[in-house]
Image (cartoon, rainbow, N blue to C red):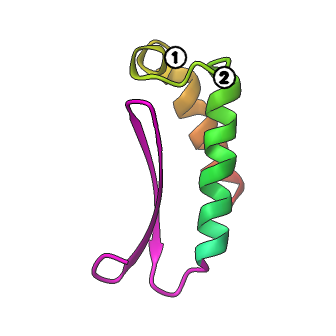
């Protein structure tokens, strides 16, 4: 917990994934969102989750993130 935010994170090679929520959010739901996003990115990048591959496919990653936020 940082200030009044809950932060869950995941590190993979040279990438860092963070999901934040208010202090009234359920930490398990935030962790599930993070795991779902990470799994989606892994599929998009064909299990090659590193900085260079992520930058090359950033448009697809942003589209994935947009779909997650839109459906929430």
Q: Estimate the x, y position of residue 9 in percent, counting from the top left.
A: 46, 56
Cα separation between marks 2 and 1: 8 Å
Q: Is residue 15 magenta?
A: yes
- Judging depth in this view, the residue of 23 and 65 nearest the camera is 23
Q: Which residue is mark 2?
A: 44
The residue lying furthest to the front in this view is 13
Q: Quadrant of the N terminus?
A: bottom left
Q: Which region is colored magenta?
A: 1-26
> Looking at the image, is mark 2 or mark 1 earlier in the sequence?
2
The local secondary structure at tag 2 comes to helix
* Residue at horizontal 68 percent and vertical 35 percent from the top: 40
- Judging depth in this view, the residue of 14 and 58 nearest the camera is 14
The residue lying furthest to the left in this view is 3
Local packing at callout 2 (Cα closer than 10 Å; few below 14, some 14-19, many 20+) is: some
Q: Estimate the x, y position of residue 33 in percent, counting from the top left.
A: 64, 57
Q: Is residue 35 above or below residue 42?
A: below
Q: Which residue is mark 1?
A: 57
Most common SS among magenta residues: strand
Q: Estimate the x, y position of residue 23 in percent, counting from the top left.
A: 45, 84
Q: Estimate the x, y position of residue 54 in percent, counting from the top left.
A: 47, 21
Quick check: marks 2 and 1 in contact, CB under 8 Å? Answer: yes
Label drawn at residue 20: none
27 relative to 3 in the view: left or right: right
Q: Is residue 33 above or below residue 41?
A: below
Q: Quadrant of the C terminus?
A: bottom right
């Amino acid at each position: 917990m940082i200030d009044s935010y809950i932060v869950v994170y995941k590190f993979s090679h040279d990438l860092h994934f963070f999901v934040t929520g208010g202090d009234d959010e359920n930490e398990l739901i935030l962790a599930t969102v993070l795991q779902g996003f990470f799994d989606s990115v892994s599929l998009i990048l064909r299990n090659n989750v590193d900085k260079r591959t992520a930058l090359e496919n950033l448009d697809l990653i942003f589209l994935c993130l947009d779909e997650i936020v839109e459906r929430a």
